[in-house]
Amino acid sequence: MSLGEAVTLAVIPQSPAARTGNGAQQEKLRRARARLAALWLARHGATEMERRQLDAPIGARAEFAMPWLAPHFVDALLAARTGRAANVETTLDASLQKMVERQIHRYIEEYGERGIRNASALLVDSRDMQVKAWVGSADYWNQSIDGQVDGVLAKRSPGSALKPLIYAMALDQGVLHPRTILRDSPTSFGPFTPENFDGRFFGPHRGGRGAHSQP
């Protein structure tokens, strides 16, 4: 490590959030480094090369600006790791990972006006069930969508995915038939009051359009 690097690293821990990132923060880091460098030079002196190092531009970046790849996948690996192996081999494909991330970003941009702010995806090779891409959220660093919560592993309601199974069971049990009129209307089950995603109800209709339909 050069003298310039050592002096720069020495002043960052005093205020890391304020001394890495944009131009103003970079200037704060530069001034702090200059003050420490002056003390070093007064006591120890320096060669011409070391003086150039102390005056060199600082290439610090905020943590979120670093080239992170599959952070949710890495978090899951670290959480599951039992040993302290130096190298961890995975089946993740970097090119497929980036492709899935791009697709999610495009989807959010296209449907953001509909209220869609987040998404997650898991890409698995069906031939051997190897994980090729793992995207836990649309933006790992976005606190407004709880971006560090891994949507691949998070428990959540299956929502309308259960409807085909529920209607099939109701048909098998004779509770309803293909021409039964269902009411998409407010109802309660004790403290639980299910509603549609947009908060509206559509009254009598055939089929299960809403989040809850009562025969």
Image (cartoon, helix red, strand yellow):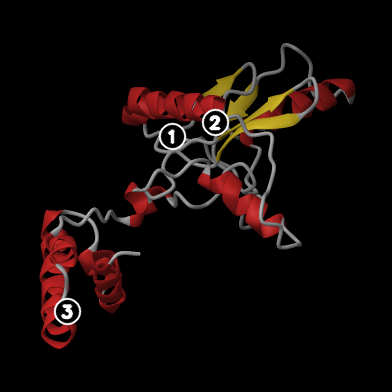
Left or right: where 127 falls relative to 134: right
User: What's the residue at 63%, 34% (across, down)?
Assistant: 92
Q: In the displayed structure, would residue 50 be above or below residue 121? A: below
- Amino acid residing under circle 3: Leu
Quadrant location of residue 15? bottom left
Front in this rendered view, residue 24 or 202: 24
Horizontal and vertical percent for residue 97? 54, 30
Front in this rendered view, residue 97 or 190: 97
Front in this rendered view, residue 133 or 33: 33
In this view, which residue lies farthest toward the top?
179
Would you say the residues marked 2 and 3 are in contact, meaning their CB atoms lie under 8 Å apart? no
Quadrant location of residue 10? bottom left
- Amino acid residing under circle 2: Ala
User: What's the residue at 41%, 48% (across, down)?
Assistant: 145
Horizontal and vertical percent for residue 31? 10, 70
Front in this rendered view, residue 45 or 99: 45
Judge depth for marks 1 and 2 and give the one in front.
2
**Distance from label 2 to label 3 (Cα)?**
41 Å
Q: Name the residue beneath numbered marker 3.
A: 36
Which quarter of the figure is the N terminus placed in? bottom left
Helix, strand or loop at mark 2: helix
Q: Name the residue beneath numbered marker 1.
A: 198
**Which mark, by number, is residue 94?**
2
